[in-house]
Amino acid sequence: MYSEKVMDHFQNPRNMGEVENPDGVGEVGNPQCGDVMRITIKVDDQDKIEDVKFKTLGCGAAIATSSMVTEMAKGKSLDEAAQISKKAVADALGGLPPQKMHCSNLAADGLQKAIEDYRSKTPQK
Amino acid sequence: MKQPIFLDNAATTRTDREVIEAMSPWLDENYGSPATLYTLGAQSKQAIEEARQQVGDLIGADSKDVYFTSGATESNNWAIKGVADAREEQGRHIITSVAEHHSILMPCKFLEKKGWEVTWLPVDGEGVVDPGSVASVIRDDTVLVTLAHANHEIGTIQPVADIARITRERGVAFHVNAAQGVGHVPLDVQELGCDLLSLSAHKFYGPKGAGALYARRGTRITPLIHGGAQEKKRRAGTQNVAGIVGLGKAAELARRNLEAEAKRLTGLRDYLMESIEGKFEDIRLNGHRTNRLPNNVNYSIEGIEGESIMLSLSYPTADDARPVYISTGSACVSGTLEPSHILLALGVPAELAHGSVRVTMSRETNREDIDYLVKALYEVTERLRSMSPVYKRGSKKCATGSAEGCDCEAAS
């Protein structure tokens, strides 16, 4: 049902945890729906994502997309990272089962929220 | 891969060797249609009648009241639609509960769409239907009450005999979906007092695709499948001879060791519950503690989600680890956005229903398997909880904005 890549990220998640003193925090989802993702980011003085970590409550797809989005975002500029779409995350995982596209592919939204959070707290140059 | 431990026996069981051996000639040299008169066919006819006797003996029924079907889903559909049709002029009201299997829910909803009225009885926090509530909703136009003998998810056993006394007094047909109980606990249609009862071979070490509906003589029921004169003109189609022989054999084997095995599994079940409750924090038992199937255990584990528990147990990463197969009431496996309707009916909050695990044992299950499961489940729980942004945080607030009644569609 899941691709090998999804299973790999589910079993060996990258960047799991919380960034210490994060510059931005994004949380999406809802325990009643079975999925909550929390993305924390550290941004360097070049506006690059220096570090990013996730914590996720959810199914295999929820955990795998969270892991993948952190891998995709790490080292990118905020503008580049803000372009990462749900579809891009799913594609990078070799696809997701159709019913999972809808409910469990929230990680990109979590990242966007973390970026917005950072931008709202930081005076724009 | 190391030998898996199969603990999803409410879904299906491994077909017994003896059953397979009994079936094999009926797929091979004895291929005659039971409807034909020459020897080849007559042998098949005789084999079916022997199986009917074996099934009748298992459930305390006159074998003449046993009709073979493709399984409990067909039997349930037939009982509901067949009685509704046969008694339509008497009334169009059916009673069931909110915690039934989909093969009960969906036929009832189908009839609802066609203009029948369905009363959906609630269950209590442990999944029990109050017989008094049945009595209070029976009306003059009620034709059928349909309830499970034992719930497939939480294992809770219903007070079937008490309900049957009520339906009998009121002249209402009573159908019992006994797919989970038959072959596992002693069940006798005379003692239960029901008019119809569904069973399925593959739930008690028989083959998939064979089952039966018991219909007490005199119960008015229209056929679901029309055609030839098979099964006394009540269920058309050339019988699945091998499957039926397998069902008969499974019934015979189950009957031989029924009470001892039920007792053994009850001991193992209680041992599993003690082990889990002694080791895990923040869990909730779903279903009745004692009045439940001997092989069923169901817990909600706070802070994590069922599919990821199930996946972690099925695909362990360590080379020497054994896969463990269980099931969950999470939305992720229900094919909808909603978690198990049965857990919700008990009043289990949605977030805990998503984190439910069902363990259902078989006659192959031993103490060692249970110890292995508890250890593996504990490790998985620790790992997933360490990843969970909500466990031990306390707040159940919706991250997407609204504080309650969060719409899952809108949330994504």
Image: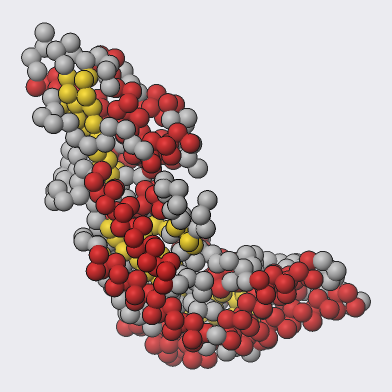
Query: Is B19 left or right of B402, judged from the image as shown?
Result: right
Above or below, B188 relative to B276: below
Colour treatment of the image: secondary structure
Residue placed at 81% from the left, 76% from the top? B44
- Residue B192: give x, y in percent of width and height: 47, 87
Q: Looking at the image, which residue is at 31% across and 54% down?
A: B379
Nearer to us in this view, B411 or B7: B7
Tell me if residue A116 can be seen: no
Q: Position of residue B333 (x, y in %)?
A: 43, 51
Residue at the extreme front of the image, as rendered: B320
Q: Is residue A17 visible?
A: yes
Q: Residue furthest top?
A: A125
- x, y percent for residue B380: 33, 52
Q: Nearer the viewer, residue A120 or B15?
A: B15
Residue toward you, B257 or B4: B4
The quadrant in which residue B375 appears is bottom left
Q: Residue at x 46, y 56 (%)?
A: B322
Which image quarter: residue B245? bottom right
**Residue A42 horizontal side relative to residue B238, left or right:** left
Q: Position of residue A89 (x, y in %)?
A: 38, 27
Say which residue appears at 42% left-offset and 37% top-offset.
A8
- Depicted B136 relative to depicted A64: above or below: below
> Which is more toward the observer, B127 or B31?
B31
Q: How many marks?
A: 0
User: Quarter-wise, where is residue B367 in the image?
Assistant: bottom left
State the quadrant of the C terminus of chain B.
top left
